[in-house]
Amino acid sequence: MNSPLPTLTSGSWALTELVGSLRTTLSRDSLGEELLVFAYAVSLSGWNQIRQDIASWRKAKSRRRVIAYVGTDHGLTAPEALRAMQTDGVEVHVMVMYSGTYHPKVFWLRHSKQNFLWIGSNNLTRNGLLNNIEFAALIQCAAVSPSLSSWLAEVQSGSQPLTRARLRSYAKERQEYSKSRAKAKIGEFTWTKKSEPPLSASAARTPSSGTAIVPRLGASGDLVVEVMPKETGTSGNQVQIPKTPAATYFGLPGTAGSSISVTLSPLGVAASRTCTMKSYGNDTRRLQINELDFTDRPCVIVFHRTATHTYDFEIVSQSVFPSRYATLLAGSTQTSPRSKRWRIV
């Protein structure tokens, strides 16, 4: 029987917590000139976890490059994430000529004398970096094997730079796919036997540590709103807010055409944005959550007021946190029979 051949042989490797290890290494690096990212799937909320660290590394030394080779299989990569990466100065390439599924999850920091490779199961998504059970290793080597160089060459030959035309094409086809999911009311599959162990508040870890964040919103006074598979904004990032919490919690008048500005900050990310919540003639109130994707549905969004018209929010997907999802919805009010649920805790 033949012995299995390793993909890479290295004298120095270690199990690692991906986000924390990547952040620490980039902040201390003074030699690296190129960071390569190979990602099966990227979401905006995932990119937000590391974008500041990568931007700081790139700007700390002239002529540094960040090049990403991103997959589009199964529609998991969000067009908004690709746009954000380009805005941040990343040279984005998408896979267009290949067989099978493009499935790697690798960061490769290239030095003339030293290479750092983070190789793991983590997708570049919020759940992949923060919530899931993942496995990653950091490999350090002075020189890479010919097989790895050959693999890189194949990825490069199968990819093309992300142009406006390619992004429009992908975004349009992905939206049509998400429309069909929404029409069929298809959410992410969750086995009914799945549950998660209870975690006390004292077990929570801070975002700055780079470790997984134990969800913490849902205290007294927080607003819980259900997001269903079939809902406004089939790409996944626009939700309907029931008129009662829109008025009592957000302060949005009920008159059609009324609007207010709200500032939103995703839990665990040191960034915020101001957006508009508006009342429409069909008696709906809509709010766009950029970090929300159709793959999160069904889910609940928990809002926590930090100041006037300023809120932290957390997305709790049923497929990731089934027990907590059910707990947050327990005792919720329906806006109408068979309609969405909400409550103020």
Image (cartoon, grey):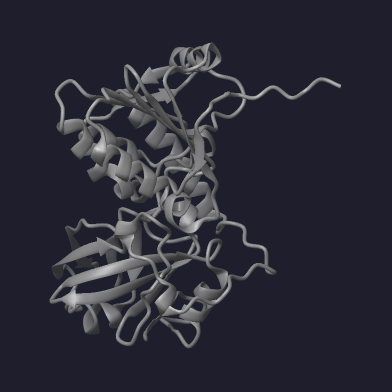
Q: In this view, does 184 lie above or below 194?
A: above
Q: Is residue 185 left or right of residue 110?
A: right
Residue 38 in view in this figure: no
- Residue at the location (15% across, 73% down)? 309
* Residue positioned most to the right: 1
| Quarter of the image where the C terminus is located | bottom left
Q: Position of residue 98 (x, y in %)?
A: 55, 19
- Residue at the location (30% across, 73% down)? 303
Q: In this view, does 71 lie above or below 146?
A: below
Residue 339 in view in this figure: yes
Q: Which of 157 and 281 is in front in this view?
A: 157
Q: Position of residue 159 (x, y in %)?
A: 43, 18
Q: Where is residue 102 in the image (x, y as percent from the top left)?
A: 54, 29
Q: Nearer the viewer, residue 267 or 327?
A: 267
- Residue at the location (58% across, 73% down)? 197
- Residue at the location (47% across, 75% down)? 339
Q: In this view, does 318 lie to the left or right of 141?
A: right
Question: What is the count of numbered marks?
Answer: 0
| Quarter of the image where the N terminus is located | top right
Residue 160: name its quadrant: top left
